Amino acid sequence: MRSSVRTTIRFALIGFAGLLVLLIALKLLIPAGENVHPPLSRLDAGTKTAMVSYLRDAGLKPEEYIVSKFRIYDVVLLGENHRVQQDPLFVQRLIPVLYRNGIRLLGFEFASREDQSRLDHLVNAPTYDESLAIGILRNFECGIWPYREYLDIFRAAWALNARLPHDSERFRILPMTSYIDGEKLRYGTDSERKEQERCLTSADSLIGEVVEREALEKGKKILVYCGFHHAFSRFRQPMTDDNGAVFSGRYFETRGGQRIYHRYPGRVIMVKLHSPHWYPAFKGYGLPFGGVVDQVFQGYRQPVGFDIAGSPFAGFRDSTSVYALGRGSISFSDFCDGYIVLDEMKNFRPTTVIPAWLDGVSFSQFKRHFFRELPFYVIHPGIFLWMVDDNPVKNYPQLGRELEQEP
């Protein structure tokens, strides 16, 4: 009798899970309506030709561009929009180039500082330990970053160090976030919750601390790879509501890049990797600065890095993205110092989920330690991985194809 009850319950749960999956799939398959994107600033043929000529004359291959900035600056802040496959793949390729040019430090948003010793061990071990690598990446923000291309940045550093002579200085990856205990954040005492809330928002302060302690105070140079909001140095990002639509009347003043820039003027540069921007009035992403970069790149079509100040791009303005809130408009030169385009946006691809992300992990414990309550239907690791694979980058190529649809 007891066995029969257990069997009935098991089949009921399987049926319930199947129904949930079916409902979710139907929701994904039903068209949500056509998105309306912000209008493009059309370039006339002469302007476009002149700007393509600028890229040919002044632009550099992305790896060369980053290295050239280290001839002037000690800190290069490389800001990404997150989960675009091309970006972490670029950082993988960049690691041996950095080392050959005397840059031995990579600041890395996507790992916890508590794992520094484990990370040092990983990238200097005789053989590469992928299970250890996954464990380190899984400690970043309670396991929300199961992406192969970021994981393989560890492997790229290990491969470089494995080829070096025994007495050579090793390449180091420096984590720049705090470990978050989701159980304490959600169920702990008042003091425990406050401490974990501080950890949850500590990346900006840690970027400043790690760069100063491990690089600037020791006379070393460092590439900091992080989300571009953390990388802002001169630009003051507007604060908004949770939907990114309503300006609060205040601006961020202590982003990671700002902390370093104000303490060490003249030694820091912020370089942004090409990505869409959020447009509140359109409730979606659109090409930045009216798509000027994308239009020019159509006539260039080679990965390129270039300075914004003094370039034909500098004066182009944006009045409708989230970054223009409270100001009316901003110029391209207000926004960042350098810019890298790795590919046309129509070719952007999302990062790849690691199937073995939760192998050997108790899923019930994983959910309990996650920093927020997961939806009730997340009853299996596969559903969690499906959930984090729901990546807005999948929609970015359509933004790039808009250019081809314009007259």
Image (cartoon, helix red, strand yellow):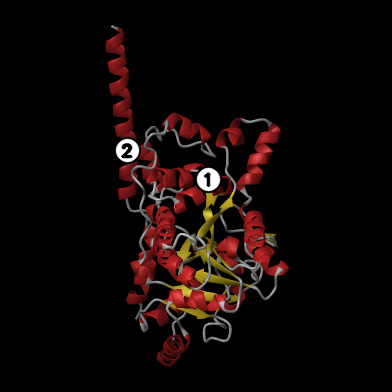
Bin the neighbour count of mark 2 within 10 Å (Cα to Cα): few under 14, some 14-19, many 20 and up.
Answer: some
- Residue 400 at what x, y percent from top left? 37, 70
Q: Nearer the viewer, residue 252 or 290?
A: 252
The kind of residue on which mark 1 rests is: Glu
Instruction: Identify the residue at image location x=64%, y=70%.
Output: 235
Q: Nearer the viewer, residue 276 or 95?
A: 95
Quadrant containing the C terminus is bottom left
- Residue 336 at what x, y percent from top left? 58, 73
Bin the neighbour count of mark 1 within 10 Å (Cα to Cα): few under 14, some 14-19, many 20 and up.
Answer: many
The kind of residue on which mark 2 rests is: Val
Q: Nearer the viewer, residue 250 or 90?
A: 90
Residue 230 in view here = yes
Instruction: Identify the residue at image location x=54%, y=71%.
Output: 271
- The residue pinned by badge 2 equals 21
Q: Nearer the viewer, residue 238 or 155?
A: 155
- The residue pinned by badge 1 equals 141
Instruction: Choose top left, top right, bottom left or bottom right for residue 265.
Output: bottom right
Q: Nearer the viewer, mark 1 or mark 2?
A: 1
